[in-house]
Amino acid sequence: MYRSALVLALSAILLGACGKQAAETQAETQVSASATSTAQHDRSADRTVFVQECTASWPKSQQTAAVQQYCDCMADYVMNKYDAETYRRIDDAIRSQQSNAETEAFMADLNGNGLKACPAPAAE
């Protein structure tokens, strides 16, 4: 139960952290020559923010190497499974507290397949 609550809270925090980047990316991708380069950079920034927010969501005393590995794994899972457009659309919906079928499916995916791919470390 602790893991389920953590994943749900974590995903809401992590997705909210990328909101400003999503707006910037949307504007930047309209510039055709640099759109691909910018999108790749922003995707890298999305991943970095995801890992930082994931790690920070754990109590300071539990921010261990195992938690860092878990957060890296979850970031890889999310970034590989969801393209930038889908990820940012879900991010926007969660930030604006608009639950819909897509956000519910995302949360269920993190809580199910995400935790299978990246088991949360045991609380110490």
Image: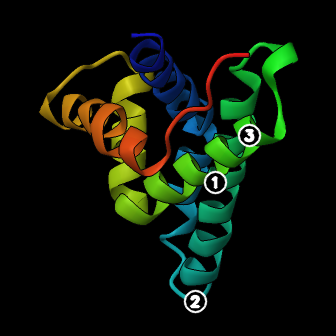
Q: Quadrant of the N terminus?
A: top left
Residue 41 or 118: which is nearer the viewer? 118
The label number, if any, that marks residue 119 in the structure image: none
Residue 93 or 30: which is nearer the viewer? 93
Residue ID for mark 2: 33
For marks 2 and 1, give the one nearer the viewer. Answer: 1
Q: Is residue 77 left or right of residue 121?
A: left
Colour scheme of the rendered structure? rainbow
Q: Is residue 93 left or right of residue 58?
A: left
Going from N to C along the chain, the mark reached first, 1 or 3, is 1
Residue ID for mark 1: 47
Residue ID for mark 3: 66
Q: Looking at the picture, does residue 99 appear above or below residue 40? A: above
Q: Residues within 10 Å of mark 1 (few under 14, many from 20)?
A: many
Residue type at tag 1: Arg
Q: Residues within 10 Å of mark 3 (few under 14, many from 20)?
A: few
Label 3, secondary structure: give it.
helix
Residue at 36% in and 58% down: 82
Going from N to C along the chain, the mark reached first, 2 or 1, is 2
Residue at 68% in and 20% down: 57
Q: Are marks 1 and 3 in contact (CB under 8 Å)?
A: no
Q: Are marks 2 and 3 in contact (CB under 8 Å)?
A: no
Q: Residues within 10 Å of mark 2 (few under 14, many from 20)?
A: few
Q: Quadrant of residue 115?
A: top left
